[in-house]
Image (spheres, rainbow, N blue to C red):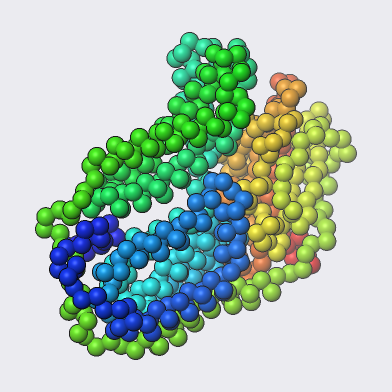
Amino acid sequence: MCSDLGWWGVAMNEVNPPAALSVQARRPLTASGWQHALSMLLLAQLWLLFCYRDTLVGMVGIWTRSETFTHGFLVLPISLWLIWRSRDQLRPLTPRPGWLALPLLAGAGFVWLLGALASTNVLAQFGLVFSLILTVPALLGWQIARQITFPLFFLLFAVPFGEFVIPTLMTWTADVAVLGIRFSGVPVYREGLEFVIPSGNWSVVEACSGVRYLIASLMVGTLFAYLNYYSLKRRLIFILVASLVPIAANWVRAYSIVMIGHLSGNTLAVGVDHLIYGWVFFGVVILAMFSIGARWQEHTAPAGLTPPNPAASSHRGRPPLWPVAVVLLGLITVWPVWQWSIEHKQPPPLGDLAVLDGTGPWQASGQLFTGWQPSMETPSVQRTVVYEHGKQMVGLYVAYYRQQDDNHKAISSRNVLVRLDELNWKQLNHRAHSVDLPDQVLSVQQAELRNRYGDRLLVWQWYWVNGRWTDSPRWARAYTALAQLAGQGDDTAVVMLYGREDKDYPAPPAMQSFLAASMPALASRLQQVRGMP
């Protein structure tokens, strides 16, 4: 019955092991092939980390520079400690190679390859960690892996993952803060993530999203649930609570900071104490959550749940380890070799990019109507051209990428319309939008920008990858990986069309008119650039 609970129930007797285990003869782990198997496991994992070293270095680099993911340094020590706690359950087991883990290991390696080819760090990092996990059942066997399933999967917290929820959390925080301010009787005017109250202006920035609270609470809450509960139901409930509480606490924190600043005449909660108050408040909330959770701590396993009996398997013949080890080392090696062969077939860097001179009634103009420029991370080449038709003007920006890597890629969190520290421009909103053209419906991401003088820009953004148009960063990454697997390179273009919002000459009709006249020529031009050395 224990096995039916999966990784939530495999170590339910660790805290208070049953008497049968406590009086069991404690033979050393060097017996029953443990020494040989552990040596081979260590060798395989070191070889894995060496082959995927660029991914490992990138992951550690994120831990170092991002306060959101500093906890990554603690994940491996905690996992090893949890495994050490299970040593009494592992000692009587006999390592038996698990051939069925090899196809899964191959799948994890392929995921790593796709992430590396598409310059999608999180995908490559998950591929690395899953490969590391799967070496255990491959070389030690599934029975041993089941006993330490939670410590193994706890390694997934080492992956810097979760920043994709930041825009959503920021929007939710702004919604709740504004709702609370209005409920408190304070007049408020909101535009996007910025709002104005009588005592001053406020805005929800990335640090206000609460993603740090959420990730920290989720990791610690999962560990707490594993150590303090045996039943699957209680563990899942506590993890759900650990996910929801920091989000709600961040809403209360944001509202409280604004109200404290307002009521104190902007003398409190507006400087360094803003951050201090946030972390102190979060600490109090999390401490209270754990204190309440400890009241339902399970000190003993529920009746009827007994640990698995490993004695039967120890009498069976043990298959040789070296065939599995040889195949495993080969599966680890093949993916970096494949990546190397693909990347060395890439065409040379671009020398120039000439965008369209003009199509139909729209002609290129040397006149600029805005000083805005997107913040793009080291494209191979980029061009901005302004087109005019009568009194209507639009701007076309194209950033072309070739031979992409971690510091030079089309799709990156550092490629934005407006940087957070930008003083002149602010992004007000962002949403999906469809543009009806004569031969197609083009999906774009639409954003509205505003500068300090009140001027507004409407921006449409989408991607071109190997002849495909898409507004989705995820699909753009997938198209890039597939193109590279087919030997067609990683050429990717980020395309932006923008126009000034004017009551006499609104931007959407002008931008749609330009695309209707220019899309076929633009697609043809990008295809030509793709074939250029």
Q: Position of residue 368 (x, y in %)?
A: 84, 35
Q: Quadrant for the N terminus, please.
A: bottom left
Q: Is residue 151 above or below residue 195?
A: below
Q: Nearer the viewer, residue 385 or 183?
A: 183
Q: Position of residue 341 (x, y in %)?
A: 64, 76
Whether residue 445 is visible to the viewer of this picture, yes or no, is yes
Q: Nearer the viewer, residue 11 or 176?
A: 11
Q: Nearer the viewer, residue 80 or 487?
A: 80
Q: Position of residue 251 (x, y in %)?
A: 46, 29
Whether residue 511 is visible to the viewer of this picture, yes or no, is no
Q: Is residue 518 left or right of residue 98?
A: right
Q: Nearer the viewer, residue 486 or 145?
A: 145
Q: Is residue 189 above or below residue 117?
A: above
Q: Is residue 191 left or right of residue 318?
A: right
Give the total of numbered labels: 0
Kindly give the residue lying farthest to the right in the view shown: 366
Q: Is residue 464 above or below residue 489?
A: above
Q: Is residue 310 left or right of residue 411?
A: left
Q: Residue at x 35, y 66 (%)?
A: 84
Kindly give the residue lying farthest to the left in the view shown: 304
Q: Residue at x 60, y 42 (%)?
A: 444
Q: Residue at x 79, y 67 (%)?
A: 533
Q: Residue at x 63, y 35 (%)?
A: 447
Q: Position of residue 442 (x, y in %)?
A: 60, 44
